[in-house]
């Protein structure tokens, strides 16, 4: 079973680190911060970062008011990079933000879900919720398994990515790898927001697998597109643009020409705004699906086998 941060940590092994919430004054006077000073080498006056056998993440500003979510997220991203760069250590993240800072557990879960924490970070059980997206066939089934319903929760005994358990993707674009917008029979796939919990296996980069899942809300096509756009806006904020988002590699996701590219590209497997043979939205590929002129286009196109709102011979 997955390990969670203990409620009370009084000692650590040499390769373990205590991660606590601090304030911008570096006044570690109470709660976990005081424990960090007394037991794990935290330094009075140092507001953020590694210190002794601890790591401080500011949740309060200099006036002892809670920091903005964007600032806390930036600090968590900095921590995630530090933890990834120190893979030989185990980091115990405490319930930062949930004390005098005034963040609710739900707020903290939302913020943490935006961060790609490496596997050597242990989190509190209260934070063990993944907000994600899941795709289904037209009958709201996944790979012929469970019959899912919106609003219901499901549980199983074990989870292993790509083998068993409930699978979902934190990145909405990734779900189209498993269920394209339109299947080979012309049926639209269905998409929903979900919450994953229990034991969560994050061993695969494009999906998470869990023993618990709740189907929060079905999105519909407009809602799914909106979720994809919001993800793009989040990832293309000036401080977050990286080579996975804007490049020309075969697996690039935005603004590229790779064969597996997803937005604004000309790759064969591209999905939006491209000319690839299997492109899905706004393209001219032979198997394009939406708004295209390909021979196999399916929606709003002029392909010979187009199916919806088009001028194709088999429309």
Image: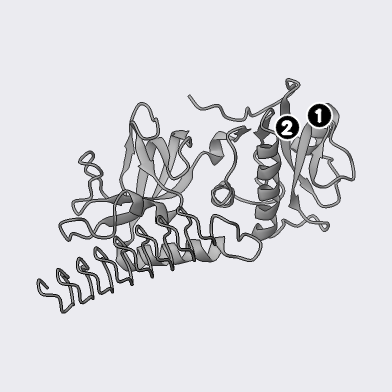
Seen from this angle, which residue lies furthest left?
314
Q: Position of residue 178 (x, y in %)?
A: 32, 48
Q: Residue at x 63, y 51 (%)?
A: 103
Please tell me whether residue 44 is drawn above or below residue 64 in the rendered image. Answer: above
Spatial CA distance of label 2 from label 1 is: 7 Å
Q: Residue at x 57, y 34 (%)?
A: 119
Q: Residue at x 73, y 20 (%)?
A: 13
Q: Position of residue 262 (x, y in %)?
A: 41, 60
| 150 with respect to 236 (left or right) | left
Q: Position of residue 19 (x, y in %)?
A: 72, 37
Q: Which residue is mark 2?
A: 18
Q: Which residue is mark 1?
A: 40
Q: Position of residue 261 (x, y in %)?
A: 43, 58
Q: Would you say residue 16 is visible in this rendering? A: yes
Please tell me whether residue 251 is drawn above or below residue 18 in the rendered image. Answer: below
Q: Are marks 2 and 1 in contact (CB under 8 Å)?
A: yes
Q: Quarter-wise, where is residue 228 in the image? A: bottom left
| 130 with respect to 243 (left or right) | left
Question: Of the numbered discs in the image, which one, if any, rests on residue 114?
Answer: none
> Image quadrant for the C terminus?
bottom left
Q: Would you say residue 216 is visible in this rendering? A: no
Please tell me whether residue 5 is drawn above or below residue 141 in the rendered image. Answer: above
| 18 with respect to 267 (left or right) | right
């Amino acid at each position: 079973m997955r390990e969670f941060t203990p409620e009370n940590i009084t000692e650590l092994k040499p390769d373990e680190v205590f991660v606590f919430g601090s304030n911008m004054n570096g006044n570690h006077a109470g709660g976990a911060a005081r424990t960090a000073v007394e037991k794990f080498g935290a330094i009075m006056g140092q507001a953020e970062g590694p210190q002794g056998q601890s790591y401080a993440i500011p949740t309060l500003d200099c006036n002892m008011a809670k920091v903005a979510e964007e600032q806390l997220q930036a600090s968590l991203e900095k921590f995630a990079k530090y933890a990834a760069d120190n893979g030989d250590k185990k980091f115990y993240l405490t319930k930062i933000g949930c004390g005098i800072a005034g963040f609710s557990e739900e707020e903290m879960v939302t913020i943490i879900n935006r961060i790609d924490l490496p596997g050597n970070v242990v989190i509190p059980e209260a934070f063990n919720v993944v907000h994600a997206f899941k795709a289904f066939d037209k009958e709201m089934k996944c790979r012929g398994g469970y019959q899912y319903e919106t609003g219901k929760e499901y549980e199983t005994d074990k989870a292993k990515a790509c083998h068993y358990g409930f699978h979902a993707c934190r990145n909405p674009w990734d779900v189209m790898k498993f269920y394209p917008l339109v299947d080979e029979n012309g049926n639209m796939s269905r998409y929903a927001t979900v919450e994953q919990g229990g034991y969560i296996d994050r061993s695969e980069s494009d999906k998470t697998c869990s023993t618990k899942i709740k189907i929060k809300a079905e999105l519909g096509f407009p809602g799914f597109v909106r979720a994809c756009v919001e993800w793009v806006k989040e990832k293309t904020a000036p401080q977050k643009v990286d080579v996975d988002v804007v490049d020309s590699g075969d697996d690039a996701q935005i603004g590229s020409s790779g064969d597996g590219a997803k937005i604004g590209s000309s790759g064969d497997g591209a999905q939006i705004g491209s000319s690839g043979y299997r492109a899905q939205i706004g393209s001219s590929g032979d198997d394009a699906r939406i708004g295209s002129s390909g021979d196999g286009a399916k929606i709003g196109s002029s392909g010979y086998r187009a199916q919806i709102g088009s001028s194709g011979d088999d429309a």
